[in-house]
Image (cartoon, grey):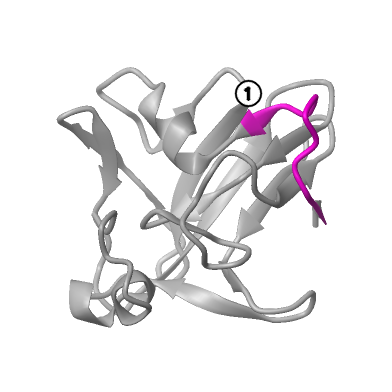
Amino acid sequence: MPRLAALHPTAARVTSLALLGALLAPLPARALGTLAELSVVDRSTGQTLPLYTHAGRTYVAGQPGHRYALTVRNRRGERLLAVMSVDGLNVLDGQPAAWGQTGYVFGPWQRYAVSGWRKSDAEVAAFEFTALPDSYAARTGRPANVG
């Protein structure tokens, strides 16, 4: 597992949103950015899900009730800090995502699947496709970026 770290000013910074936003359409099941490769895997079926773009944003369609993971691969020969978000919330602390937050530090060429909201060093709450009212973002009063 990549180690967790606070953002260092000289570290490479990337969020899943920024990574996806920089991609060209149409997108294959995995998105290639210059720093990292991102794919969304349905953990119930094992399938890598296709990504869709609309109005400059990128989306993934999932089956309600299915759990999923974000698989990230560092495409560089040096360490990379990835500040990742789901529905606009940082996957490590559940706060609205921003550049200066804590993220995952990936070693050169390292790949890792982030399967849920980090609750502690040993426990995660699974990412799950659900209706807007049942989403983590809506339940915590921050549904603005649920897609």
Position of residue 80 measured from the top left corner of the image (x, y, whole percent): 75, 33
Residue at the image position 63 percent from the left and 56 percent from the top:
113
Vertical comparison of 108 with 61: above or below: above
Residue at the image position 25 percent from the left and 23 percent from the top:
26
Amino acid type shown at disc 1: Leu
Q: Nearer the viewer, residue 6 or 46?
A: 6
Assess whether residue 11 is covered by the magenta stretch.
yes
The residue under label 1 is: 35
Residue at the image position 38 percent from the left and 78 percent from the top:
140
User: Which portion, as a residue range, is magenta?
Assistant: 4-13
Residue at the image position 37 percent from the left and 28 percent from the top:
21
Residue 111, image quadrant = top right
Vertical comparison of 129 with 122: above or below: above
Assess whether residue 6 is covered by the magenta stretch.
yes
Relative to residue 66, is residue 111 drawn left or right? Answer: right
Position of residue 39 measured from the top left corner of the image (x, y, whole percent): 48, 43
Vertical comparison of 6 with 28: above or below: below
The local secondary structure at tag 1 comes to loop
At label 1, counting other C-alpha atoms closer than 10 Å, the crowd grade (few under 14, some 14-19, many 20 or more) is some
Relative to residue 59, is residue 47 drawn left or right? Answer: right
Q: Nearer the viewer, residue 37 or 28?
A: 37
Quadrant containing the C terminus is bottom left
Residue 100, image quadrant = top right
Majority secondary structure of magenta residues:
loop
Relative to residue 69, is residue 143 drawn left or right? Answer: left
Q: Residue furthest left?
A: 55
Query: Across the whole image, how many numbered discs are drawn on residues?
Result: 1
Quadrant containing the N terminus is bottom right
